[in-house]
Each structure stands twice: as structure tokens, then as C-alpha cells.
Image (cartoon, coloured by chain):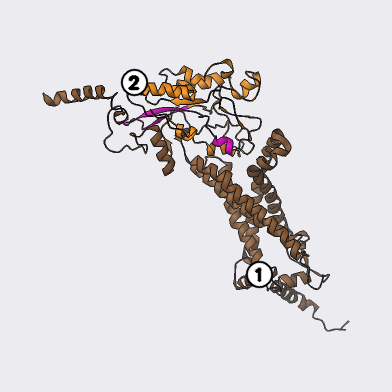
Chain colours: A orange, B brown
Amino acid sequence: MARMKFLCDSDRCIECNACVTACKNEHEVPWGINRRRVVTINDGKPGERSISMACMHCTDAPCAAVCPTSCFYTTADAIVLHDKDLCIGCGYCFYACPFGAPQYPRVGNFGSRGKMDKCTYCAGGPQADNAAVEYIQYGANRLAEGKLPICAEMCSTKALLAGDGDMIAEIYRERVQKRGYGAGAWGWRTAYKQTLSV
Amino acid sequence: MTPRILPALALAFGLAAAPLAAPAFAQIGGPVVGTAANPVAPNLSADELELQQALTGGRIAGRVSIPDSRSASLIQPEGRDWRAFHNITLAWVGGVAVLGMLAIVLLFYATKGRIQIEGGRAGRTIQRFNILERAAHWMTAGSFVVLALTGLNLTFGRYLLLPLIGPEGFATLTLWGKYAHNYLSFPFTLGVVVLFLAWVKDNIPNRVDIAWFKAGGGIIGSGHPVSERFNGGQKLVFWITVIGGALVAISGYVLIFPFWATDIAGMQLAHIVHGVISVLMIAAMIGHIYIGTAGMEGAFDAMGTGEVDLNWAKAHHGLWVEKQLDKARETVTPSAARAAGAD
């Protein structure tokens, strides 16, 4: 099986936020929840870069390690998913996550934050693929239809790459070799304990 | 003429050289002169930046267009430290503290048994705690037991209970446990405040306590060191409750209202304080519960009926009994001071 990863080529990202919008639309993500976001560092200064960030589907995921109810599981494609029926909304995964991926429908209501929501890599949840209940809880299951995540598919500059880690790393390497520069793969050291050498 | 064409030449050279001199000339716009106000160094690659932040403990942050300032944090390596604390440090400290205290208590019961009242019960009693004190004590104690069990469940439940009752049952239990934990924090905090106000005047450490601790509290060794209303050990429990209770209450309310008062580093710190102080308090309270119930004959009456046996009181709180009897004599004597046989 593939080892699914995200790679954001920050030398291509133009901060158009189409990935954010596409994600919200595809999964009908409610107000206040952003499964994906675009962070601009050094905004307005030399060296400005925008990076589209969501759940990185880590190797040895910190969220799964700290979850009191063990509601996380990893699919055969190495995608980190969770069972909302087991989630108690304690917020521990948010404290442990390096990427700020876990989101909660409510904030501060005596700790009743609701069930955690995060990027599913467009792979749904534990229910039957593309069942109505799966859509309500987790959004579309594009992977079951043989499609890649909508954020990467929609990306106008093809900055955001999704797919098997080795394949997208190879695409990125070719790009960097051709154009002569590249800031590297954001979050890969943290998420996959791997550096992308070019 | 020369100065005019220099930038053009530089640009042309730069464009031509770019594919050859890869990362060194990577930045669009050339090398950055001066320091950027943003803490993120613009010359570093993603990998170098991540390594640097992981080593120095900083966050990689920027600007987001969505109205949620927390999401401006791109990578926070501190999550890894918090994970290590939660899964390793807290589990070990909590496990050793709680199981260790249970083992000590059991060993103590097995070797010394229940401490009896010397000379048996007198049959006469003396009031030790009034109804307000007992009510405050049991409100605090009752909520503490639930808070302790539901808190331990968050750290240890997945290893101990989850395999027994299955994921669905365990998730339901833990969810209700979380609600109980959140709402019972209020009676617990109120109880700690009331107990503090009611008992602080009798809990100021003094010389008698030093002597009490030197004599091993009469628990280790033999004989009863004298004590006032509260002995050295009880004063210790009082201050553990007041100081520990205040710390868990403050850190707990920071956790109940996520991100109202602090950022993610503050939330992680609040959890660390909450977790460590809680397991240490649980260990202390196991000792307190033991000595107040199974460990000593006559001790439970103090918080049960509020009336303790006079012999028990004399043995354990001799100075306090003296004071109480003196007070009683002062109030009783005048009206009872009739000559015998005057009737």
C-alpha cells in the first residue's frame, strides 16, 4: 500500500486559499472549523512564504499517543483517522499536535468542546465508505472513489501535493532540480522524522 | 553609465546562475540584509527551520486570513514534550505515587494493624467538629474522590479499563467522567475555601509540631507526642489540601476554559501542573483516608458524628482537650458552684 503524505511547495504557494475553500465545501465543514489553513510567514518581508497546512497524518502520531479513549486509528494507507463516537472532546490531541490540526465545534463551554474534527485526507471515517452517516460526521470519502484529497487536486499552482510519499517527493525533487531552489518539505521532519534531500 | 547597467547585469547573472547555485541563491530577491521583525529566519529551509525550532523550543508562526489567531501557529514542537510528559512522566509519577502509597498503607496495616485507643473507650465524648466543618469536609472529600477517579481514568483508563469494558462503554464512561470532573470542581473549590477559613487558625505550624514530627507522630515508634487541636500530620494534610487544592483549581479552570486566559504553551503548562499536583494529592489523601478510617480506632467519629471519645482525644490531642475542658469549666462553674447539700 501507499504511504500517503502531504507536501506543500512553499515556493509555489500564492496564498489563494483555494485549498481551504475547497475543503470546507467538499466536506461541508461547519463555521469555526478549518481542517486546512494557509499560514504566511515573514509576511510582507523578504523571504515571505505561504504554507498550506492541515493534519500531516504523522508517523507515530502524537494525537493517537495521548488520546485518553484511544479513538485514533491508522489506515492501510498510513492515514490517521479518528472515531468521533469515541471522542470526548478533551482537547489533548490539540496540545500534542505539532500542526494545530485538531479542531473543535465549540470553544470554552465548560470543556464541552464537542467532537474533535480534523482533516481526514478525504478518506472519511470508520463507517462504511460513503455512507450517509460517514458524510455527516467526516465528510466525503474521495479515497474510496479512487480520488486524491480535494485540496491538492484543486491547487491552481500545484503547490500542494498529495499522494504516496515517495512519488510526491520525487515530483518535488524534479521541480527543485529544474528551477534551482526549494525551501523543502514543510513539516516532514516533524511529521515523518524524514528530511527531503534534493 | 556603469551604475545604471549594474542592477541589470546582476539580475541577468542572478537568473542565469540560479539553477546552478541551488539553495545558496534560493531566495527570491537575493540574500536578506538586516534582521526581519518576524522570528522566522528567512534564509533557512523548512527542514533547518524545523530542526532549529525543535532544538530551541520555539514555534514557527505567521499570519492567517481566517479569524482564528491560534491557527497562525504553523509548527509547535513543544507538543512533543507535552506528549512525553503525558505518556511517560505523568504515568510514572502517578503510578508510583498512587500504587506506592497504597502499598505503604497495606504494609502498615499488615504489620501494625489498627491502632487501638489506649485504655479503651471512656464512654464519654467531646465535640471535635461541628456540623459546618463536617459538611464542608464531606463536600470537599466526596467531590475529591470523584475528581480523583475520573482524573486517573483520563491517564490510566485506556490501559486498565478499556480492555475490560470495550471502546464504546469506555468512551461513554469517560465522557460522563469528564462532565463530573468539570462540574464537581466547583463544590471542591468551595469546600477548600471553607475548610481554609474554618481551620487556618489552628493549623499554623509551631514548635509542638516539630516535636511531633521528631517523635514520628506516635505512628512510627512508640508513645504519643502531645499536640493541640491538629497535630503535625494533620497540619500537613491541611496545607496539602489548601495549597495543592488551590493549584489544581487554578490550573483546572484554565483547562476548563481553553485558550481564554492563555495560549497553547500555557494550556500545556496548566495540564502539567494539574496532573502532577493531582496525583501527589491523591497519594497524600490515600494516607489521610487510611488513618481516618481503618488505620485508627475512634478516628472516624471526628468526621462521622463529630463527637470523639474522650480517651481518644486525650491520647491524640491532649493540649486541645485541656483547653476545651478549661473553657467548659469556666462556663459551667459559676452556675454549678453551689455548696453541696444546700438543697
Disc 2 or disc 1, which is closer to the eye?
Answer: 2
Decide: few, some or many residues near mark 1? Use Cα within 10 Å; few <14, some 14-19, many ≥20.
some
Quadrant location of the C terminus of chain A? top left
Image location (x, y in percent) of residue B131 = 74, 59
Subunit ID for the residue under disc 2? A
Decide: few, some or many residues near mark 2? Use Cα within 10 Å; few <14, some 14-19, many ≥20.
few
| Residue on which disc 2 sits | A178
Image location (x, y in percent) of residue A195 = 43, 32
Q: Which residues are magenta?
A: A37-65
| Residue on which disc 1 sits | B216
Image point 65% across, 65% down: which residue?
Answer: B233
Image location (x, y in percent) of residue A136 = 62, 22
Subunit ID for the residue under disc 1? B
Q: Describe the element under mark 2 as helix, strand or loop.
A: helix
Q: Is residue B115 magenta?
A: no
With respect to residue B123, does A15 lie above or below?
above
Q: What amino acid is labelled 2 in the image?
A: Lys
Q: Can you see residue A172?
A: yes
